[in-house]
Amino acid sequence: MNAVEIEEAISALAEQPFDTAEFPYAFLEAFGRKETALKRALKFKLERGRLPSITAADPWEKRMAEGVAFLARMKAEVADG
């Protein structure tokens, strides 16, 4: 996605009523991320008792870790105001 598409998606998201359960998925989709990526990371945590590692040798685990790190940064930015 390019910057214009992201801005349009975020603007559309801002116009919708806030839904706590669906917001993380909608936010990631606005940046071109798939809802399934977040669900897979959560499933990974439930099955293995840990979050995916950014230093993993497995490219799939590393990619999931990048998504988790992205979401953590966004959450921190919102908390900082």
Image (cartoon, rainbow, N blue to C red):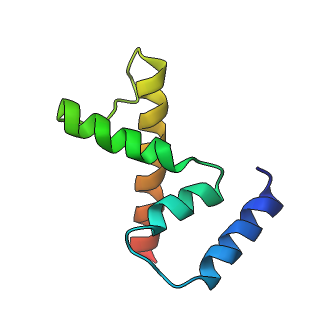
- As displayed, is residue 53 above or below residue 23? above
Q: Determine the residue positioned at 48% across, 44% down.
A: 36
Can you give x and y, in whole percent of width and height, for residue 40 in the image? 39, 39
Of residues 67 and 46, the one drawn nearer to the viewer in this rendering: 46
Q: Determine the residue positioned at 38% across, 74% down.
A: 20
Q: Judge from the rendering whether residue 16 lies leftward or rightward of residue 40; answer left or right.
A: right
Q: Residue furthest left?
A: 49
Q: Residue furthest top?
A: 57
Counting labels gives 0
Of residues 60 and 69, the one drawn nearer to the viewer in this rendering: 60
Q: Hey, which quadrant is residue 7 in on the image?
A: bottom right
- As displayed, is residue 80 above or below residue 67? below
Q: Judge from the rendering whether residue 66 lies leftward or rightward of residue 49; answer left or right.
A: right
Q: Judge from the rendering whether residue 23 lies leftward or rightward of residue 8; answer left or right.
A: left
**Residue 51 makes an appearance in the image:** no
Q: Determine the residue positioned at 40% across, 54% down.
A: 72
**Residue 2 makes an appearance in the image:** yes
Q: Determine the residue positioned at 66% across, 50% down.
A: 32
Of residues 9 and 62, the one drawn nearer to the viewer in this rendering: 9
Of residues 24 and 7, the one drawn nearer to the viewer in this rendering: 24
Can you give x and y, in whole percent of width and height, for residue 73 in the image? 45, 55
Can you give x and y, in whole percent of width and height, for residue 61 in the image? 41, 26
Can you give x and y, in whole percent of width and height, for residue 4 in the image? 82, 62
- As displayed, is residue 69 above or below residue 12? above
